[in-house]
Image: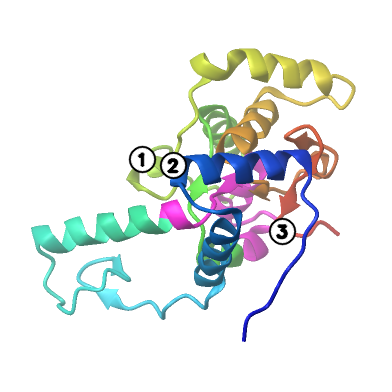
């Protein structure tokens, strides 16, 4: 059964539709249909994770022997997941709670960290702030180099975004936004994601893409 759908598009969405029509040589209806199919695939229940080899998950390789092909296939599968799923931004307050076992929010943040099925991204100012805070925290168990093993990705390049970071600092001068917060806001713009792991209530006030509210993955009471 065919269904006819009418929708009002804002200027930004209409411009995106026009670009896709030109670049992909599709009709507007075909673009909409492909978009619905893509969203349906992304929203489908993720496959049950299987333990493959040593520390390998969801590689799709039916063997328990880690080989070079196993590692390559796992990396390719991880890359496909990163392309299909929007990443979640990570703030220093979350990292401190995860790695500091005596932190009041440790259990809640650790549970979220275990089950979240999104790539985690952050920036070097957040890493530096986290290490500084954990150095003086009781129960801290942070490995300063752990972000290099794939737990966190750091795609942000300050030398390319310094002007925008400075603009954010000026915009939220009354809050005030610190340097790491400003970098995360710019990252949200660059990566097109408002999902964030944070315990900082200021992110309920901050906006990315000028008017978009952040989606706090850990609700703040």
| C-alpha span from label 2 to label 1 | 8 Å
Number of residues whose C-alpha sits closer than 10 Å to that of mark 3, classed few (under 14), some (14–19) or many (20 or more): some
Label 2 or label 3, whichever comes before in sequence order: 2
Q: Residue at x 60, y 54 (%)?
A: 28
From the image, tell me which residue sits under label 3. 218
Q: Residue at x 73, y 25 (%)?
A: 178
Tell me, for residue 153, which label it has, or none: 2
Q: Is residue 117 above or below residue 164?
A: below
From the image, tell me which residue sits under label 1. 148
Q: Is residue 11 left or right of residue 191?
A: right
Q: Is residue 6 magenta?
A: no
Residue 130, percent from left and from top: 58, 36
| C-alpha span from label 2 to label 3 | 20 Å
Element marked by disc 1: helix
Asked if labels 1 and 2 touch by Cβ distance under 8 angstroms, the answer is: no
Element marked by disc 2: loop
Q: Residue at x 52, y 34 (%)?
A: 127
Whether residue 53 is visible here, answered yes or no, is yes
Asked where in the image residue 40 lies, by quadrant, the reply is bottom right
Q: Which residues are magenta?
A: 82-109
Asked where in the image residue 210 lies, by quadrant, the reply is top right
Element marked by disc 3: loop
Number of residues whose C-alpha sits closer than 10 Å to that of mark 1, classed few (under 14), some (14–19) or many (20 or more): few
């Amino acid at each position: 059964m065919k269904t006819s759908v009418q929708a009002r598009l804002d200027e930004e969405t209409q411009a995106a539709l026009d670009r896709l029509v030109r670049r992909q040589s599709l009709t507007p209806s075909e673009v909409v249909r492909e978009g619905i199919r893509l969203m349906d695939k992304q929203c489908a229940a993720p496959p049950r994770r299987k333990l493959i080899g040593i520390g390998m998950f969801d590689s799709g390789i039916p063997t328990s022997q880690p080989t070079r092909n196993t590692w390559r296939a796992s990396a390719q599968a991880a890359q496909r997941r990163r392309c299909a799923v929007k990443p979640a931004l990570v703030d220093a307050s979350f990292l401190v709670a995860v790695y500091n076992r005596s932190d009041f929010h440790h259990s809640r943040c650790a549970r979220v960290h275990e089950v979240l099925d999104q790539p985690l991204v952050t920036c070097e100012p957040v890493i530096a702030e986290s290490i500084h805070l954990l150095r003086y925290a009781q129960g801290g168990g942070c490995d300063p180099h752990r972000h290099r093993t794939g737990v966190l990705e750091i795609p942000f390049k300050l030398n390319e975004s310094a002007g925008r970071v400075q603009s954010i600092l000026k915009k939220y001068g009354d809050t005030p936004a610190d340097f790491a917060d400003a970098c995360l806001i710019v990252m949200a713009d660059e990566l097109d994601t408002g999902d964030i792991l944070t315990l900082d209530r200021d992110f309920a006030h901050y906006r990315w893409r000028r008017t978009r509210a952040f989606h706090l993955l850990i609700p703040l009471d």
